[in-house]
Amino acid sequence: MSASNLRELLIEELKDIYDAEQRITKALPKMAKAADSQELKTAFQEHLRQTEQQIKRLEQVFDELDEPAKRKECKAMVGLLEEGEELMDEEDNPSDVLDAGLITAAQKVEHYEMAAYGSLRTWADLLGESKVVNLLQTTLDEEGETDKKLTEIAQSLNIEAMQGEDMEMGEGEEVPVRATKRNHRSS
Ligand code: FE
Ligand code: FE
Ligand code: FE
Protein backbone atom coordinates (compact mmCIF):
# COMPACT_ATOMS: atom_id res chain seq x y z
CA MET A 1 0.00 0.00 0.00
CA SER A 2 1.42 3.37 -0.93
CA ALA A 3 0.32 6.42 0.99
CA SER A 4 2.54 9.44 1.55
CA ASN A 5 0.14 11.34 3.78
CA LEU A 6 -2.90 10.87 6.00
CA ARG A 7 -5.35 11.75 3.23
CA GLU A 8 -3.90 9.05 0.96
CA LEU A 9 -3.96 6.58 3.83
CA LEU A 10 -7.63 7.46 4.42
CA ILE A 11 -8.44 6.81 0.74
CA GLU A 12 -6.52 3.50 0.71
CA GLU A 13 -8.23 2.26 3.85
CA LEU A 14 -11.62 3.37 2.53
CA LYS A 15 -11.05 1.14 -0.51
CA ASP A 16 -10.24 -1.73 1.86
CA ILE A 17 -13.41 -1.37 3.95
CA TYR A 18 -15.49 -0.73 0.79
CA ASP A 19 -14.34 -4.14 -0.44
CA ALA A 20 -14.88 -5.73 2.99
CA GLU A 21 -18.48 -4.48 3.24
CA GLN A 22 -19.33 -5.92 -0.16
CA ARG A 23 -17.91 -9.29 0.82
CA ILE A 24 -20.00 -9.14 4.00
CA THR A 25 -23.21 -8.65 1.97
CA LYS A 26 -22.40 -11.92 0.19
CA ALA A 27 -21.72 -13.78 3.45
CA LEU A 28 -24.62 -12.58 5.63
CA PRO A 29 -27.41 -14.31 3.64
CA LYS A 30 -25.50 -17.62 3.93
CA MET A 31 -25.03 -17.08 7.67
CA ALA A 32 -28.73 -16.26 8.11
CA LYS A 33 -29.61 -19.45 6.24
CA ALA A 34 -27.22 -21.56 8.30
CA ALA A 35 -28.32 -20.15 11.67
CA ASP A 36 -30.77 -22.26 13.63
CA SER A 37 -32.05 -19.63 16.05
CA GLN A 38 -34.73 -17.35 14.60
CA GLU A 39 -33.35 -14.48 16.66
CA LEU A 40 -29.91 -14.95 15.12
CA LYS A 41 -31.33 -15.30 11.59
CA THR A 42 -33.19 -12.01 12.06
CA ALA A 43 -30.08 -10.29 13.42
CA PHE A 44 -28.07 -11.34 10.35
CA GLN A 45 -30.85 -10.25 7.99
CA GLU A 46 -31.15 -6.88 9.72
CA HIS A 47 -27.40 -6.36 9.56
CA LEU A 48 -27.46 -7.20 5.85
CA ARG A 49 -29.84 -4.28 5.29
CA GLN A 50 -27.62 -2.04 7.41
CA THR A 51 -24.53 -3.18 5.49
CA GLU A 52 -26.17 -2.25 2.19
CA GLN A 53 -26.71 1.25 3.61
CA GLN A 54 -23.12 1.34 4.84
CA ILE A 55 -21.91 0.68 1.28
CA LYS A 56 -24.01 3.62 0.05
CA ARG A 57 -22.58 5.73 2.88
CA LEU A 58 -19.03 4.85 1.78
CA GLU A 59 -19.93 5.94 -1.75
CA GLN A 60 -21.04 9.28 -0.28
CA VAL A 61 -17.69 9.48 1.53
CA PHE A 62 -15.72 8.89 -1.71
CA ASP A 63 -17.92 11.48 -3.38
CA GLU A 64 -17.32 13.98 -0.59
CA LEU A 65 -13.55 13.47 -0.98
CA ASP A 66 -13.75 13.75 -4.82
CA GLU A 67 -12.37 10.26 -5.21
CA PRO A 68 -13.79 7.41 -7.31
CA ALA A 69 -15.34 4.62 -5.22
CA LYS A 70 -12.91 1.76 -5.77
CA ARG A 71 -12.36 -1.57 -4.04
CA LYS A 72 -9.06 -2.98 -2.90
CA GLU A 73 -9.13 -6.58 -1.70
CA CYS A 74 -9.41 -6.74 2.07
CA LYS A 75 -7.36 -9.85 2.79
CA ALA A 76 -8.42 -9.88 6.42
CA MET A 77 -12.11 -10.05 5.49
CA VAL A 78 -11.42 -12.81 2.96
CA GLY A 79 -9.83 -14.79 5.80
CA LEU A 80 -12.44 -14.02 8.43
CA LEU A 81 -15.25 -15.02 6.09
CA GLU A 82 -13.41 -18.20 5.12
CA GLU A 83 -13.35 -19.17 8.78
CA GLY A 84 -17.12 -18.69 8.89
CA GLU A 85 -17.49 -20.83 5.76
CA GLU A 86 -15.45 -23.63 7.31
CA LEU A 87 -17.82 -23.65 10.25
CA MET A 88 -20.88 -23.86 8.01
CA ASP A 89 -19.34 -26.64 5.88
CA GLU A 90 -19.03 -28.83 8.95
CA GLU A 91 -22.21 -30.88 8.79
CA ASP A 92 -21.95 -32.75 12.09
CA ASN A 93 -22.07 -29.74 14.40
CA PRO A 94 -25.25 -29.59 16.49
CA SER A 95 -27.29 -26.53 15.52
CA ASP A 96 -26.84 -24.67 18.81
CA VAL A 97 -23.08 -25.18 18.69
CA LEU A 98 -23.05 -23.96 15.08
CA ASP A 99 -24.98 -20.86 16.18
CA ALA A 100 -22.45 -20.16 18.93
CA GLY A 101 -19.66 -20.44 16.33
CA LEU A 102 -21.52 -18.22 13.84
CA ILE A 103 -21.90 -15.51 16.47
CA THR A 104 -18.17 -15.56 17.18
CA ALA A 105 -17.37 -15.43 13.46
CA ALA A 106 -19.73 -12.47 13.06
CA GLN A 107 -18.29 -10.66 16.08
CA LYS A 108 -14.77 -11.02 14.68
CA VAL A 109 -16.03 -9.28 11.54
CA GLU A 110 -17.72 -6.52 13.57
CA HIS A 111 -14.56 -5.89 15.57
CA TYR A 112 -12.48 -5.59 12.41
CA GLU A 113 -14.99 -3.07 11.10
CA MET A 114 -15.06 -1.14 14.37
CA ALA A 115 -11.26 -0.83 14.32
CA ALA A 116 -11.30 0.31 10.70
CA TYR A 117 -14.15 2.82 11.01
CA GLY A 118 -12.76 4.19 14.28
CA SER A 119 -9.43 5.05 12.62
CA LEU A 120 -11.07 6.34 9.44
CA ARG A 121 -13.36 8.60 11.46
CA THR A 122 -10.42 9.96 13.48
CA TRP A 123 -8.34 10.66 10.36
CA ALA A 124 -11.28 12.39 8.65
CA ASP A 125 -11.65 14.53 11.76
CA LEU A 126 -7.95 15.47 11.70
CA LEU A 127 -8.31 16.37 8.03
CA GLY A 128 -11.27 18.64 8.79
CA GLU A 129 -13.75 16.54 6.77
CA SER A 130 -16.75 16.94 9.05
CA LYS A 131 -19.35 15.44 6.66
CA VAL A 132 -17.16 12.39 6.25
CA VAL A 133 -16.77 12.14 10.04
CA ASN A 134 -20.56 12.06 10.45
CA LEU A 135 -21.03 9.39 7.80
CA LEU A 136 -18.31 7.17 9.27
CA GLN A 137 -19.51 7.69 12.83
CA THR A 138 -23.02 6.57 11.86
CA THR A 139 -21.64 3.31 10.50
CA LEU A 140 -19.28 2.88 13.46
CA ASP A 141 -22.28 3.15 15.80
CA GLU A 142 -24.19 0.52 13.80
CA GLU A 143 -21.28 -1.92 13.96
CA GLY A 144 -21.02 -1.39 17.72
CA GLU A 145 -24.76 -1.96 18.20
CA THR A 146 -24.58 -5.13 16.12
CA ASP A 147 -21.71 -6.41 18.22
CA LYS A 148 -23.70 -5.77 21.41
CA LYS A 149 -26.79 -7.47 20.01
CA LEU A 150 -24.72 -10.53 19.09
CA THR A 151 -23.36 -10.64 22.64
CA GLU A 152 -26.91 -10.65 23.99
CA ILE A 153 -27.99 -13.46 21.66
CA ALA A 154 -24.85 -15.40 22.58
CA GLN A 155 -25.67 -15.18 26.27
CA SER A 156 -28.88 -17.14 25.80
CA LEU A 157 -27.67 -19.45 23.04
CA ASN A 158 -24.45 -20.49 24.76
CA ILE A 159 -26.49 -21.78 27.66
CA GLU A 160 -28.50 -23.93 25.25
CA ALA A 161 -25.30 -25.18 23.63
CA MET A 162 -23.93 -26.16 27.03
CA GLN A 163 -27.16 -27.86 28.07
CA GLY A 164 -26.94 -29.98 24.95
CA GLU A 165 -23.72 -31.46 26.28
CA ASP A 166 -23.56 -34.49 28.51
CA MET A 167 -22.95 -32.54 31.66
CA GLU A 168 -24.85 -34.75 34.10
CA MET A 169 -26.70 -31.86 35.55
CA GLY A 170 -29.32 -32.48 38.19
CA GLU A 171 -32.98 -31.50 37.88
CA GLY A 172 -33.40 -27.76 38.06
CA GLU A 173 -29.68 -27.20 38.28
CA GLU A 174 -28.56 -24.18 36.33
CA VAL A 175 -25.66 -23.66 33.98
CA PRO A 176 -23.27 -21.11 35.47
CA VAL A 177 -24.35 -18.01 33.57
CA ARG A 178 -21.42 -15.90 34.70
CA ALA A 179 -18.94 -18.17 32.94
CA THR A 180 -20.89 -17.77 29.70
CA LYS A 181 -21.06 -14.01 30.00
CA ARG A 182 -17.38 -13.72 30.70
CA ASN A 183 -16.59 -15.31 27.35
CA HIS A 184 -18.70 -12.77 25.52
CA ARG A 185 -17.99 -9.58 27.35
CA SER A 186 -18.65 -6.77 24.93
CA SER A 187 -15.94 -4.28 24.23
FE1 FE B 1 -20.30 -2.99 8.02
FE1 FE C 1 -8.61 -4.94 5.31
FE1 FE D 1 -20.93 -5.00 10.37
Image (cartoon, rainbow, N blue to C red):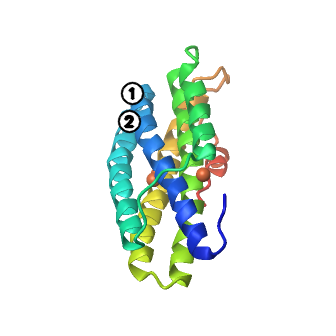
The residue at the point 60 percent across, 25 percent down is: 86
The residue at the point 42 percent across, 74 percent down is: 132
* Residue 46 left/right relative to 139: left
Residue 21, how many percent across, how many down?
A: 46, 49
Spatial CA distance of label 2 from label 1 is: 7 Å
Q: Quadrant of residue 97?
A: top right
Q: Is residue 138 visible?
A: no
Seen in the picture, residue 94 relative to 74 is either above or below; the reply is above
Quadrant (top left/top right/bottom left/bottom right) for the C terminus = bottom right
The residue at the point 62 percent across, 26 percent down is: 170
Mark 2 highlights which residue? 41
- Label 2 sits on a secondary structure element that is helix
* Residue 83 left/right relative to 142: right
Amino acid type shown at disc 1:
Lys
Query: How busy is the neighbourhood of tag 1: few (under 14 within 10 Å), some, or many (20 plus)?
Result: few
Is residue 1 or residue 95 the one in the foreground? 1
Seen in the picture, residue 26 relative to 165 is either above or below; the reply is below
Amino acid type shown at disc 2:
Lys
Residue 6, how many percent across, how many down?
A: 61, 75
